[in-house]
Image: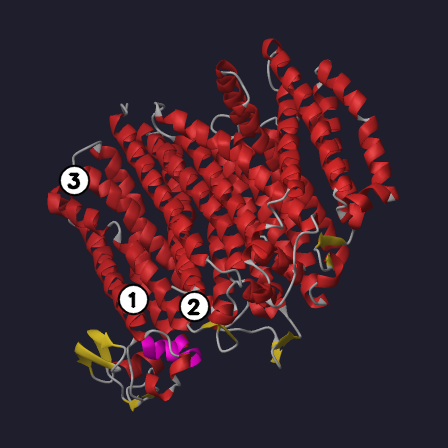
Amino acid sequence: MDNLDAARLQMAFTLIFHIVFACIGMVMPFFMIIAHKKWLNTRDPIFLKLTKSWQKGVAIFFVVGAVSGTALSFELGLLWPEFMKHAGPIIGMPFSLEGAAFFVEAVALGFYLYGWGRISEKFHWFTGIIVGLSGVASGILVVSANGWMNAPSGFDYVNGEFLNIDPVQALLNPAWFTQALHMTLAAFTATGFAVAGIHAYQIYKKRQVALHKKAFKIAITFGAIAAILQPISGDLSAKDIAKRQPVKLAAMEAHYETKKGAPLYIGGLVDDEKEKVSYKIEIPKALSFLAFGDFNAEVKGLKDYPKDVRPKVSIVHYAFQTMVGVGTLLMLAGFLFFISLKKMSWWKNKSFWLLFSILAPMGFIALEAGWIVTEVGRQPWIIHNIMKTKDAVTPMPGMIYSFYMYIILYGVLTVAVTWLMIRQIKSLNQAKLA
Amino acid sequence: MLNVVLFFLATSLVLYVILAGADFGAGIVELFSTKSNQALTKKTIYRVMGPVWEANHIWIIILIVILWVGFPDFYNVLVVYLHIPLTLVLLGITMRGVAFVFRHYDAYKDKSQILYDWLFRISSLLTPIFLGMTAGSMLSGKLVITDSYEQYTFYDLFIAPWLNGFSILVGFFFAALCAFLTSILLIGESDITNRKIYVRKSKYATLMVIGLGFLVLCFGFINDIIFITDFIKNPYTIVLIILSALLILPLLRSIKQATKVLSRTLAGLQVILILFAAMFAHFPYLIIASNTEMSLLETVAPEAVIKVLGITLIIGGLVILPGLFHLLKSFKMIKVLES
């Protein structure tokens, strides 16, 4: 494996890991403050117990997310020094604002975690809200930097030099809004379904049912609403990509031949060599409509672009199919939940709980697949149409060893955090509730 | 605006060294304690530092962001040539963070605590050593900055700059500084019966800092390391070092008398004096390579960038600092300032 591939794998691996922790750390505070509010309103001890156990979850995920985020802030430079040298001054603003938001979150979390019985109840609850809001703010801000890589703006590129830098315009790059919206909804969907799924499994196993039902309801409400809204945001994103990154769109859809009234492929096996897709389901004219809102619009195919600016089509296409497929499934599950509120008899059915337990990891699978679409789909560029990934990588040889080291480190971390979570849930189930 | 950015750069550096330093020191003091004292130290540290634990470490992110946004070429040299020590620092930070979470948030307190504790202590010692080695290698004169990588061996480019006597000594010096900060912090946080433990530790740590500092200077002088020869010649540096030497006596006395406020103030002052002495010695040439010297100020980003960065930092500072101050105050972590 050459240096570039090793560095890319290491980056992918670290990001895949970090995103899970960052999302949970960003969304779980909202579940926590809802449970907290319910405790303040009803003084039902179950809500207090729930708040405190979610708070532990938030703390664990926040800290692990913070250290993996610190690692990433170093890695960006360590792996892609040439990229950071030029991009740093341009997209530094979202990063510094994210740093500030993250700092606010850390301060607020300090208050929240250690504030029980030490500061006024109202202020204590309020600091919980700040934790949630600043978490979401840092997520939205950091996505701006990624948006800029897809839609570079805020500078003039003259003879290989970045001139007339305008960091504000770079922050407000055209890809930011659609990407941030899509990511925020994805974070709520993934975390909502994951947390709800864990509690659903406990109900399925008939442990502390009263508590887990309350927990399930709070978490799934967030997840379901986000999952139902997500297709709208997805449509905005697709139309955006069709305009700005037509190669990426073509790779997502495995669309090789330029056509008017282009069909949409569902599934299918991609042959990267022969540039063909077999075993697919075709929906006539749907791609033209989804991309441009017109059934007869022309969609440019991959063959219209030189081979050296195309991403690896099979990966992008499969990841895209996974994201859309799982996303649709979660949207349906979201509707199912809202119907179940009218038909409470479903809540007595074991298979209802089994279903939501199985759905627990699905949101994260869709979310990771989505990031693979946007990142692999941008290749070979690190900054779209400006700088290639191969020109950004570190000159230091032997990156493969660094990659192995990170695999071991994050492998151990994953096992350890999972173990810790299992122990949290076990202790919650053993607790006596008044 | 450049001055604002430099001010925030220096402030985050000082705060990171003092706050994260005291935090690293917590693990080091624990490592060098007897079994019964270890439990005591762990408990006291958690009570004092728990609420600000995360906040202490964010300063390094601010520091890195300022460097890469405001001084991209300077940052570029660090991440290319000091890839390996920085990766070791990262490993240390990650292991430490995880061990900290585990030992305080695990639902069951059983035998696994032993593992978490050791992980925490060892990584607390190694991380500042690697951090110090990274700083040392910037100034060691062993870096080779080049565009033609093929002409040099892997060892010359990526190993020699940090794996040398000077850098290693700076690493140990920084670790001693961390232990010094924590043991003095702990004097004021423990009750009268335990106080003498930390008084003793503070004395040892102070002697370690002085001894290692002296060693770094001697080693650098004997081996003609430009940074050190300039360090001893620079008038500002000499004034700062004399000041710090003069303050050692009152510091030792205040440690002996266990005066909380005075000992902490003097300890913090020592660190600031040492840091500034090192910065002034060769400012703005903060990277001293074997073939060139690199000025921080010559790598500065375009003016528009610095302007936006400065404004962002001011706004961020206005939001964060009052909150952080309030946090410290609410949990009585700054009694120092009140009394």
Dot 1: what SS? helix
Query: Which is in the foreground here, disc 3 or disc 1?
Result: 1
Left of B212 or right of it: where is B247? right
Image quarter (top left, top right, bottom left or bottom right) of the C terminus of chain B: top right
Instruction: Tell which of A216 and A103 is nearer to you.
Output: A103
Give how far across and how far down residue A398 sits, in percent.
Answer: 46, 58
Point out the tag, 3 or 1, that comes first from the N-terminus: 3
Sort mark 2 into few (<14), some (14-19) or many (20+) by Cα contacts within 10 Å. Answer: some
User: Which disc number belongs to residue A178?
Assistant: 2
Q: Amino acid at mark 3?
A: Tyr
Give how far across and how far down residue A219 sits, in percent.
Answer: 31, 46
Label pair 3/1, CB-CB below 8 angstroms: no
Dot 2: what SS? helix
Sort mark 1 into few (<14), some (14-19) or many (20+) by Cα contacts within 10 Å. Answer: many
**Image point 53% across, 33% down: which residue?**
B124
Q: Residue furthest right?
A: B235
State the separation of the CA atoms marked 3 and 2.
38 Å
Same subunit, tags 3 and 1: yes
Instruction: Tell which of A171 and B204 is nearer to you.
Output: B204
Q: Which residue is mark 3?
A: A204
Q: Tell me which chain the residue with mark 3 is part of.
A: A
Q: Which residue is mark 1?
A: A319
Left of B168 or right of it: where is A315? left
Give how far across and how far down residue B189 sits, in percent.
Answer: 61, 20
Q: Is residue B212 magenta?
A: no
Q: Tell me which chain the residue with mark 2 is part of.
A: A
Magenta region's main secondary structure?
helix
Q: Amino acid at mark 2?
A: Thr
Q: Read off the magenta span.
A: A241-251
State the separation of the CA atoms marked 3 and 1.
31 Å
Q: Is residue A265 above or below residue B314?
A: below
Q: Is residue A243 magenta?
A: yes
